[in-house]
């Protein structure tokens, strides 16, 4: 079920060796091992081709910074997809949260941590609001998640345009940009990257080891069984979409800090990128299966490809083709593993 | 006759224009195996789901140990000590056997971690393993996803779960329908052991030899109503089949007026 549990929690491992499936089957059926190997392989290939340019701390920093905002979106998306749902609205909610956050910070005025905190709170609240709308319509009104989040995608983006009149908000507290946006811990690791990884780790642990995580898998695996087991399925789904919305709000705040503008037109494919990352990471669109570690790999494969192609001198347009192929391959693997499981 | 443990009176349940239950009665006595039989569409599964809190009855009342009760959710049924093995088993196929065993009743880690919501997977697997061993369910690996297991093993998990948690009565909706000869034998033996533990078992089945082997009493449903009830020794298979098909009605046992 998850990377954390498969090895450590099986004291009876030795006596089971004889019953276990052959290595290739465990590889296919295993968690995020294959996709992690692909990422390692990519890094090796680019390192061999361009050891100086690719294997450079500045370059690693670039890759991680580019991936940070997407990693926050993918963290929430992992939960949603494990419940067999989908959230198309995350990119639009990101934009909306950035817009209301920038407006709020400008309304308060000043250039200090107090203003930044207000901006963060407004961004999180904006994301939470859209997430609750999504969750309510999906869990209570029983409208398919695809339709609900397609609707809120349009509404959140439209609301952003109404609020700004279609012009990007470019005034952001300078302190926000120099600290969270471009600042680094110990002059090395960007704060953006630290925040994104902290989010992924915390919610990865919650997913793998808590009751909230267990219910997320159960709802995605068999909603009716979860209901009959007394799990408050509707409430849980609302929480999951609220979480995805709130993290999209956080992503909007981070994006605002990084680019010092709301970039309204720049997030049209964020939702698909987040979904692709999660699915590449081994999370099943049919629900019940997935790990946060896989999603981290899934975020970094496109980021490494993009960066590596530029450095190696391949036209970066090829990145989109490569990511598309990896995505299809990942879903094919998922199908294979389901088929092999249900053969009995 | 002792006081009934669970009694349904005049249950009516419609789905749209289909009236699945038309004033159905049903009685379970403590520590007995009662078979609920009837043709396809007679309303057996609907009645069981109503008593398990999955469906809400449109009319009628449910008495538990003589007191009227409302069973709105599966949790309500659970609090009364009622557990159900559903026809579709209601297992989360992607989760392991231990997770399914404790679904909705997770064991939390001790101390602060538990209060933060961390679950004790090891404890759940160990205790599941004990339950499976007690009930003779053979699983190689309690950490493997249920989806990787055979039909008999899945049935074993679903039955073990219900039996482990039930304190009064276990409903089993066609527990042997998907099983082979040996596994069917296991489930029938298990039903006997469950009764020996002091629980009541409601067995829904089409299989007459099976019913006559394990049931103390037989209640027959037809077209959404109870049409007959028998004690095992008093009746032949032909009579039961006759009641199922409408050739005989015999609902007067115990002086019941329905």
Image: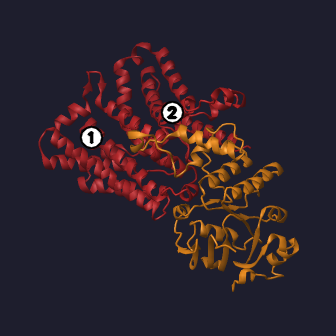
Quarter of the image for the C terminus of chain A: give it: top right
Q: Which mark is residue A256?
A: 1
Looking at the image, residue A68 lies above or below residue A40: below
Q: Quadrant of residue A171?
A: top left
Q: Position of residue A136 (x, y in %)?
A: 41, 60
Q: Which element is circle 2 on?
A: helix
State the residue at coordinates (81%, 63%): B207
Residue A333 percent across, percent down from the top left: 62, 37
Q: Closer to the camera, B144 or A111?
A: B144
Q: Colour of chain A?
A: red
**In the rendered image of this protein, which colour is used for chain B?**
orange
Please report the residue visible at 72 percent of the width from the left and 28 percent of the height from the top.
Answer: A18
> Could you tell me which quadrant the N terminus of chain A lies in?
top right
- x, y (%) of residue B258? 69, 84
Q: In which image quadrant can residue A328 be found?
A: top right
Q: Position of residue B239 (x, y in %)?
A: 85, 76
Q: Number of labelled discs? A: 2
Residue labelled with disc 2: A4
Output the chain of dot 2.
Answer: A
Residue A167 visible (yes or no): no
Q: In the shown orientation, is residue B43 left or right of residue A175?
A: right
Chain ID, mark 1: A
Q: Nearer the viewer, residue B201 or A116?
A: B201
Judge from the rendering whether residue A174 lies leftward or rightward of residue A87; answer left or right.
Answer: left
Comparing labels 1 and 2, the label whose residue is closer to the camera = 2
Question: Disc 1 or 2, which lies upstream in sequence?
Answer: 2
Can you say whether A271 is above or below B19 in the image?
above
Q: Residue furthest bottom?
A: B257
Vertical placement of residue B24 versus A280, above or below: below
Taking the spot 77% from the left edge, 53% from the top edge, the residue there is B189
């Amino acid at each position: 079920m998850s990377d954390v549990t498969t090895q450590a929690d099986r004291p009876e491992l030795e006596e089971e060796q004889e019953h276990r499936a052959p290595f290739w089957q465990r590889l296919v059926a295993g968690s995020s091992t294959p996709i992690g190997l692909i990422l390692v392989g990519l890094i090796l290939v680019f390192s061999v081709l361009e050891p100086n340019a690719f294997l450079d701390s500045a370059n690693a920093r670039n890759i991680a910074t580019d991936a940070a905002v997407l990693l926050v979106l993918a963290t929430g998306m992992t939960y949603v997809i494990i419940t067999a749902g989908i959230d198309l609205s995350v990119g639009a909610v990101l934009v909306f949260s950035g817009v209301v956050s920038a407006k709020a910070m400008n309304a308060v005025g000043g250039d200090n941590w107090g203003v930044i905190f207000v901006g963060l709170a407004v961004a999180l609240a904006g994301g939470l609001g859209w997430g609750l709308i999504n969750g309510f319509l999906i869990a209570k009104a029983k409208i398919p998640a695809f339709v609900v989040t397609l609707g809120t995608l349009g509404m959140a983006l439209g609301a952003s345009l109404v609020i700004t009149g279609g012009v990007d908000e470019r005034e952001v507290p300078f302190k926000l940009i120099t600290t969270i946006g471009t600042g680094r811990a110990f002059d090395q690791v960007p704060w953006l990257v630290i925040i994104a990884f902290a989010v992924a780790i915390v919610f990865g642990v919650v997913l793998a080891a808590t009751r909230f995580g267990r219910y997320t898998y159960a709802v995605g695996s068999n909603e009716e069984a979860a209901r009959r087991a007394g799990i408050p399925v509707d409430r849980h789904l609302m929480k999951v979409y609220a979480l995805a919305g709130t993290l999209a709000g956080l992503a909007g705040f981070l994006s605002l800090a990084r680019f010092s503008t709301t970039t309204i037109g720049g997030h049209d494919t964020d939702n698909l990128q987040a979904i692709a990352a999660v699915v590449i990471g081994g999370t099943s669109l049919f629900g019940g299966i997935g790990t946060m570690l896989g999603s981290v790999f899934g975020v970094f494969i496109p980021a490494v490809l993009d960066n590596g192609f530029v450095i190696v001198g391949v036209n970066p347009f090829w990145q989109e083709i490569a990511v598309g192929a990896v995505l299809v391959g990942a879903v094919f693997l998922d199908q294979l593993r389901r088929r092999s499981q249900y053969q009995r | 006759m002792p006081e009934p443990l669970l009694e349904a009176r005049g249950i009516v349940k419609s789905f749209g224009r289909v009236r699945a239950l038309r004033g159905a009665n049903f009685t379970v006595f403590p520590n007995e195996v009662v078979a609920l039989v009837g043709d396809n569409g007679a309303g057996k599964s609907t009645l069981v789901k109503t008593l398990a809190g999955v469906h809400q009855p449109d009319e009628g009342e449910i008495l538990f140990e003589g007191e009227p009760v409302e069973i709105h959710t599966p949790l309500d049924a659970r609090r009364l000590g009622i557990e159900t093995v559903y026809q579709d088993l209601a297992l989360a196929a992607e989760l392991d056997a231990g997770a399914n065993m404790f679904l909705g009743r997770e064991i939390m880690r001790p101390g602060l971690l538990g209060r933060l919501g961390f679950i004790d997977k090891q404890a759940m697997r160990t205790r599941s393993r004990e339950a499976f061993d007690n009930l003779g369910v053979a699983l190689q690996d309690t950490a493997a996803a249920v989806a990787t297991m055979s039909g008999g093993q899945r049935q074993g998990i679903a039955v073990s779960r219900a039996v482990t948690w039930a304190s009064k009565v276990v409903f089993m909706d066609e527990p042997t329908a998907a099983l082979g000869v040996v596994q069917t034998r296991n489930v029938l033996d298990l039903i006997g052991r469950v009764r020996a533990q002091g629980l009541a078992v409601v067995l829904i089945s089409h299989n007459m030899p099976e019913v006559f082997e394990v049931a103390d009493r037989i209640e027959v449903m037809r077209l959404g109503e109870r049409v007959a009830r028998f004690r095992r020794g008093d009746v032949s298979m032909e009579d039961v089949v006759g009641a199922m098909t409408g050739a005989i009605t015999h609902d007067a046992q115990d002086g019941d007026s329905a």
